[in-house]
Image (spheres, coloured by chain):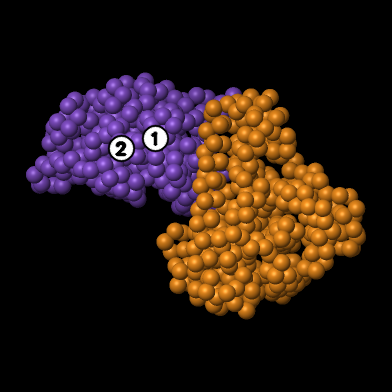
Chain colours: A orange, B purple
Amino acid sequence: MQSSACKRLVATLKTPTQAAALDLAAWSELVANARAANLAGLLAERLAAADVAIPPEAARHLDAVRQLSRRQALSVRWEVHGLQRALCRLGIPLVLLKGAAYAVSDHPVGRGRLFGDIDILVPHDALGDVELRLMVAGWASAKTSPYDQRYYRTWMHELPPMVNVRRGTVLDVHHTILPLTSRHSPDAGTIIREASTLPGLPAVRIPRPEHLLIHSIVHLLHEGELHNGLRDLFDIDGLLRAGASEADFWPRVVEASRTLDVVAPVAFGLHLARHLLDSPIPPPVLEDLLNAAGGPASRLLTMLYTTAMRPENEAAESAAAALARFAIYVRAHWLRMPPYLLLRHLAHKSIVRLKKDEPAADGRA
Amino acid sequence: MIDVTLHLAPVTVRVRSPFATVRRHLETFYPDALHGSGKARHFIDFDIHITHGTGWRRWLRPQARFFLDHAEPFLPLPATQAAPLFEWGLNWCLASRPLGYLVMHAAVVARDDDALVMPGAPGAGKSTLCAALTFIDQWRLLSDELAILAPECGTLQPNPRPISLKNESIDIVSRFPGTRLGRRYTDTRKGTISHAAPPATSHSAAARQARCRWVIFPRFVPGSAPRSEEIGRAEAFARIAEQSFNRDRMGETGFHALCEMLDKARCFDIAYDSTDTALAMVRSITGR
């Protein structure tokens, strides 16, 4: 986050009124950066809430993204009703994660946010039934290669992504929040048990606020791809601000990080949010978590994320960002699986890529 | 290497490209819209970069790649097709990026402020008829590919760009009075294509919006007897909605905009086997 344009985006999101001083070229850059970071909707909402006068050229982009995000929130609700119908007979809780949880529970973080796919978390022993029911309801596995199927089923925390054959919406079915091969082994049962119900959707659950925050952090730090890194960081900022309105929120975050065995990533994620976005985190909480994780946050890692965390259009032009992103990608895989498995996986992926001559971006798994 | 700004109602586009063919295409078809210096002072709606393939592809099987804001939305084409790639890519930008317009696949021409919308099933002869109306009957060209409907005022937004002609229609249109065709690109996905420059009057009226008065679904059927039939608005709605690129994303706003557009229009289904017959039918429908 070292370029002036990226700093301006972050600064404007934090203090929208300063946009009033921008000229047309600066607005152009601001909108382009916000879009590239997948933050245009949030920018639009915050500018509107602050009643900032926007030049019409920029306003039509921002208004349209706002409209799109509202439309998407409706669609997500509709999909969730479909999931409720498809899975209600199983009598299991169906926990929404990330964007779907924000949209369906009307969480402030969902305002202006755009969605990629729908993430759900279900009990591990119900996975087979869930997959079968979803297939009957029109969801099919998007990964066809036997290797990818095995990769997900043996080592990952989710089924291979499913795509609805009629609508093209993508569904990620998780049974825990981190890969099975990861160094950390959170017990997803805690999240599922403590999740709260929703009116009119008996099977659907929303995770507790501290679990939403923790999952968002763990996801950002283990994903390895930072296309939405800055957006995810703003999610984290929004989640902790909203959560902090409950008196015992921070003790619960600390407690849940311990219970879920993710103290280290949570400590670093919070450190990052404070470092990059000045997120309001009580200093003793951060200190305790960092101490429990084994000391102050790594300077190198902080520097890598600071360099890598920027809108896509800028990342594409910066060699430093590309290098930092590669380092984070390798580290994330390092965290995801033991070394021999990592080597095997990367070797397999590069051979497949060579054979197909496919661009690297497609080889997400 | 060019780096220019293109003021092209309703958007402003920055184009960067090392291809001389792209530069010539822009100079031929957008002389009035072209301005130097890509980025300074303007609000840029689309930042487009058409560039070479990387590595060995640059020399062995040269490619043209399309980037919008550094993202590559579709696969590269052979380098010889860099200029048509610009046109296709720009259509994609207008149809895909949220700008608040309902965008449909249709040709639009107008007389004064009364617009005639012709939704396009591929191969229906939409572009040929659109070119005939423009060059022979002097309708004003709004667009031969994209009907851009502004929901808040219910008007169609002109986007006068080169008419894209395919295969046989290239020769047919080249015989129309006042046409100016660019070079031919063979072996594209759509066969041979070429572009016809819109008349200067269409360019100069690019800020003037029009209201839909007629919707005509044209169908070219070789050897058929001419047939013209007025159809109900509900049927027209269903058929034109299918041709909308962003109807789902526009949600309720798009639905209401399309309803309102059709409320003020009469809709026809026509079949013909020659340009003259088609023009005669359009004249009798529109009274122009």
Q: Amino acid at mark 2?
A: Leu
Q: Amino acid at mark 1?
A: Leu
Which of the chains bears the disc numbered 2?
A: B
The chain that hosts pointer 1 is: B
Disc 2 residue crowd, few under 14, some 14–19, many 20+, Cα 10 Å: many
**Identity of the residue drawn at 14% across and 40% down:** B228
| Residue A8 placement: quadrant | top right
Sooner in the amino-acid sequence: mark 1 or mark 2: 1
Q: Of helix, strand and loop, which one carries label 2?
A: helix
The image quadrant of residue A263 is bottom right
Alpha carbon separation for disc pair 1 and 2: 12 Å
Q: Is residue A202 above or below residue B108?
A: below
Q: Residues within 10 Å of mark 1 (few under 14, many from 20)?
A: many
| Spot occupied by residue A50 in the image (x, y as percentages of width and height) | 67, 32
Q: Is residue B104 visible?
A: yes
Image position, residue B268 (x, y; %): 20, 40
Instruction: Have a look at marks 1 and 2 and say if they share a chain.
Output: yes
Which residue is at the front of the view, B153 or B38? B153
- Residue under pointer 2: B262
> Is any atom of residue B48 visible in this view?
no
A108 above or below A3?
A: below
Drawn side of residue A317 relative to residue B185, left or right:
right
Q: Are marks 1 and 2 in contact (CB under 8 Å)?
A: no
Residue B167 horizontal/vertical position (percent): 25, 44
Q: Residue furthest front?
A: A199
Q: Nearer the viewer, mark 1 or mark 2?
A: 2
Picture residue at 56% right of the left edge, 36% below the top: A62
Q: Residue A28, labelled with which disc?
A: none
Reading the image, the residue beneath label 1 is B149
